[in-house]
Amino acid sequence: MSKKYKLLVCCGNGAGTSMMIKLNVEKVTKKMGLDVQEIRHCAVSEGKSAASGYDIVLCSKNFISMFADAEKRGTKIVGLKNVMSAKEIEEGLLAATAE
């Protein structure tokens, strides 16, 4: 049975950008056939404390260090240079979901 993934998308203030990234992530996960239970978007400040409850966190590369604690607990952190790039999102998710 395949794993159902919980994904968290974070941006600076949790409004417009994270919502747009979330929509791209939804398209990419459908294309990949990834079994997704939940995709949530929020501000980095909120995401930092919630990240441990997710399998994968997607954020801008400059926010990666804020998720060090979650990463130690097993959450995969995907840092994006271009948060709007579907190709970059797909590459990050492929790396994060590789067993």
Image (cartoon, rainbow, N blue to C red):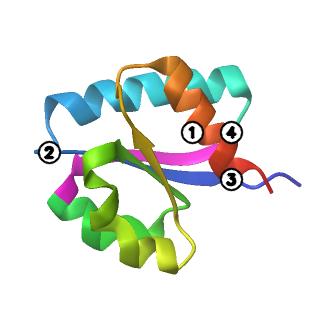
Amino acid type, mark 4 = Leu
Disc 1 from disc 3: Cα separation:
17 Å
Residue 17: x %, y % from top left:
21, 30
The quadrant in which residue 68 appears is bottom left
Amino acid type, mark 1 = Gly
Amino acid type, mark 3 = Lys
Please, what secondary structure does the residue beneath circle 4 have? helix
Residue linked to disc 3 = 4
Q: Nearer the viewer, residue 92 or 34?
A: 92
For the residues bearing labels 1 and 2, Cβ distance under 8 angstroms: no
As for residue 37 lying within the magenta part, the answer is yes
Q: Give the magenta range.
A: 35-44
As for residue 40 lying within the magenta part, the answer is yes
Mark 1 or mark 3, which has the lower sequence index?
3
For the residues bearing labels 3 and 2, Cβ distance under 8 angstroms: no
Residue 90: x %, y % from top left:
59, 29
- Residue at the location (42% across, 73% down)? 70
- Residue at the location (57% across, 24% down)? 28
For the residues bearing labels 1 and 4, Cβ distance under 8 angstroms: yes
For the residues bearing labels 1 and 3, Cβ distance under 8 angstroms: no
Please, what secondary structure does the residue beneath circle 2 have? loop
The quadrant in which residue 49 appears is bottom left
Q: Which mark is residue 92?
A: 1
Disc 3 from disc 2: Cα separation:
27 Å
Amino acid type, mark 2 = Gly
Mark 1 or mark 2, which has the lower sequence index?
2
Residue linked to disc 4 = 94
Residue linked to disc 2 = 12
- Residue at the location (70% across, 37% down)? 34
Total number of numbered discs in the rendering: 4
Please, what secondary structure does the residue beneath circle 3 have? loop
Disc 3 from disc 4: Cα separation:
14 Å
